[in-house]
């Protein structure tokens, strides 16, 4: 069994693979203050309930793949793998790790590990050219060429960041549940805010992806657009440019990166 861990700024997603199949997944909050020991206890609590794993930490785990956008959490997870999974091969996605996707940006080391891993999975599953839209703390748009190269992207404020900003900066506004309203024209303040978020972000996705696709390919219709991230379902039915929804894209990419690096040993 392969344990994959995707550490985002707000949430951490864990997936358990049996071969190519994801058989279990968990989503927890990302807390940069957690120590390696606390993370180990959390992992034991989650995986100890799974029937395919043993009672002891590490039982049934044959490999670990990790990517993180929070350096302090990556540091602690590195310690977790050393102390609690010492005999288990582990791949942490960072500069020097083989991914199979060339990064054609001014400074490849600046590109988030999750964005690279998403590109790995997108190339493997859909080929290029492609655009990955990841709805997380930030909404990121990543462009992949027809030759499977990561050529750059766009970073925009995420849905929850926008909701928080409205609640903080608007004197008569408050934080709301992110949900699809009854109609575009809101009949009350909450529905008006929900409409602004849902349809505003759908319009942003259509506009940004359309412009990227025209730069990426001679025929924009040749570009496959893949949506992922925890908040993707909020705009899936409203954004017209999305071709595929793959909620486990990052975890699949981690599995692929792990396999490619293990094949070198």
Image (tube, rainbow, N blue to C red):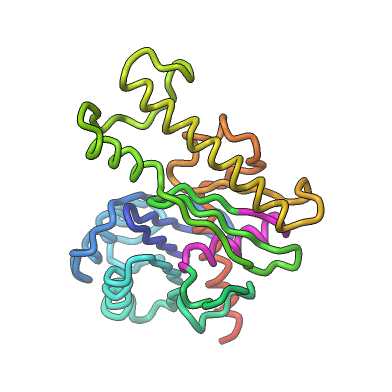
- Start and end of the magenta stretch? 112-131
Q: Is residue 195 shown above or below 225?
A: above
Q: Main secondary structure of the magenta part?
A: helix
**Quadrant position of the C terminus in the picture:** bottom right
Question: x and y percent of residue 119 in the render?
Answer: 59, 62
Q: Is residue 130 magenta?
A: yes
Left or right: 232, with 26 as reference point: right
Q: Nearer the viewer, residue 177 or 123?
A: 177
Answer yes or no: is residue 185 visible. yes
The residue positioned 43% from the left and 63% from the top of the image is 3
In the picture as drawn, the residue positioned furthest to the right comes out as: 218
Q: Residue at x 37, y 81 (%)?
A: 87
Report if residue 48 lies within the magenta region: no
Residue 151 location (% of width, % of height): 63, 67
Query: Which residue is more in the foreground, 212 or 127?
Result: 212
Extreme residue in the bottom direction: 265
Front-most of 161 and 11? 161
Does 257 appear above or below 182?
Answer: below
Along the line of sight, the residue nearer the viewer: 222 or 201: 201
Q: Residue at x 52, y 48 (%)?
A: 228
Any part of residue 19 in sight: no
Q: How many marks?
A: 0
**Which quadrant of the structure image shows residue 103?**
bottom right
């Amino acid at each position: 069994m392969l344990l994959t861990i995707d550490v985002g700024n707000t949430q951490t997603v864990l997936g358990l693979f049996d071969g190519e199949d994801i058989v279990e997944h968990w989503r927890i909050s990302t807390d940069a203050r957690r120590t390696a020991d606390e993370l180990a206890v959390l992992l034991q609590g989650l995986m100890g309930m799974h029937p395919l794993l043993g009672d002891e930490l590490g039982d049934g785990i044959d490999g670990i793949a990790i990517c993180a956008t929070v350096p302090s959490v990556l540091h602690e997870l590195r310690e977790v793998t050393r102390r609690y999974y010492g005999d288990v091969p582990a791949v942490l996605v960072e500069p020097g790790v083989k991914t199979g996707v060339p990064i054609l940006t001014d400074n490849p080391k600046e590109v988030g590990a999750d964005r690279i891993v998403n590109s790995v999975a997108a190339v493997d599953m859909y080929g290029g050219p492609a655009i990955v839209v990841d709805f997380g703390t930030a909404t990121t748009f990543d462009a992949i060429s027809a030759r499977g190269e990561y050529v750059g992207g766009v970073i925009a404020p995420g849905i929850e960041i926008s909701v928080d900003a409205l609640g903080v900066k608007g004197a008569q506004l408050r934080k709301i549940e992110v949900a699809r309203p009854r109609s575009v024209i809101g009949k009350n303040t909450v529905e008006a805010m929900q409409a602004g978020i849902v349809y505003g972000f759908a319009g942003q996705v259509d506009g940004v992806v359309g412009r990227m696709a025209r730069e990426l390919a001679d025929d924009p219709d040749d570009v496959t657009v893949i949506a992922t991230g925890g908040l993707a379902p909020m705009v899936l039915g409203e954004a017209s440019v999305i071709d595929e929804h793959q909620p486990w894209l990052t975890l699949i990419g981690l599995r692929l990166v792990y396999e490619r690096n293990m094949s070198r040993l």
